[in-house]
């Protein structure tokens, strides 16, 4: 667990968005986040169809395991997850940003 007082922003101003075509569910983000933002889970079948061909192949190869952000509102933008992700799948964005490539999935909102 990292230092819990390492945040740079008030909770929820910036949030992590996960590129579903890159995430392989390795869990480094879960391990490093001091605020418990992430969890691992299985990408829903309906969400798999929106992936690129490469994303679908990667997803299938990894059993559709991906990281989700059920506690995104707790993010304080320390950046540990961005640096830790071996797939470079995480981007910190303003919570109100509208970028389809980094759109939250239904699982992210649960
Ligand atoms: S930047 Fe990443 S590691 Fe840091 S609080 Fe936000 S989600 Fe957690």
Image (tube, helix red, strand yellow):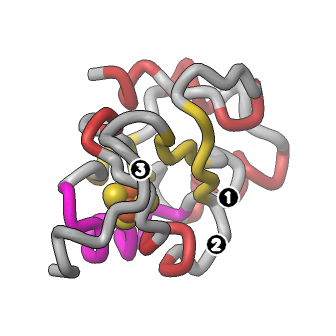
Task: Using the rendered view, name the quadrant where residue 44 is placed.
Answer: top left
Horizontally, is 23 left or right of 19 in the view? Answer: left
Density class for disc 2 (Cα within 10 Å; few <14, some 14-19, many ≥20) is some
Circles 2 and 1 in contact, beta carbons < 8 Å: yes
Q: Which residue is mark 1?
A: 22
In space, the residues marked 1 and 3 are separated at their CA atoms by 26 Å
How many numbered callouts?
3
Q: Residue furthest right?
A: 53
Task: Indicate which disc residue 35 carries.
Answer: none
Horizontally, is 42 left or right of 46 in the view? Answer: left
The nearer-to-camera label among 1 and 3 is 3
Magenta stretch: residue 26 in it?
yes
Relative to 71, say whether 99 is above or below: above
Q: Which residues are magenta?
A: 24-35
Q: Position of residue 29 (x, y in %)?
A: 38, 67
Quadrant of the snapshot with the C terminus: top left
Density class for disc 1 (Cα within 10 Å; few <14, some 14-19, many ≥20) is many
Relative to 95, say whether 22 is above or below: below
Magenta stretch: residue 27 in it?
yes
Element type at marker 2? Answer: loop
Horizontally, is 19 left or right of 62 in the view? Answer: right
Element type at marker 3? Answer: loop
Counting residues from the start of the chain, the first of labels 2 and 1 encountered is 1
Task: Indicate which disc residue 9 carries.
Answer: 3
In space, the residues marked 2 and 1 are separated at their CA atoms by 6 Å
Element type at marker 1? Answer: loop
Q: Which residue is mark 2?
A: 87
Density class for disc 3 (Cα within 10 Å; few <14, some 14-19, many ≥20) is few
Relative to 107, say whether 25 is above or below: below
């Amino acid at each position: 667990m990292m230092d819990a007082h390492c945040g740079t922003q008030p909770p929820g101003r910036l949030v992590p968005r996960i590129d579903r075509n890159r995430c392989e569910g390795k869990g480094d983000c879960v391990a490093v986040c001091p605020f418990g933002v992430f969890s691992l889970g299985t990408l829903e079948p309906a969400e798999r169809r929106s992936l690129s061909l490469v994303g679908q192949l990667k997803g299938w190869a990894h059993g559709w395991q991906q990281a989700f952000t059920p506690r995104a509102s707790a993010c304080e933008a320390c950046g540990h997850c961005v640096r830790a992700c071996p797939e470079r799948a995480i981007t910190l964005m303003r919570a109100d940003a509208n970028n389809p490539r980094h759109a939250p999935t239904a699982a992210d909102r649960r």
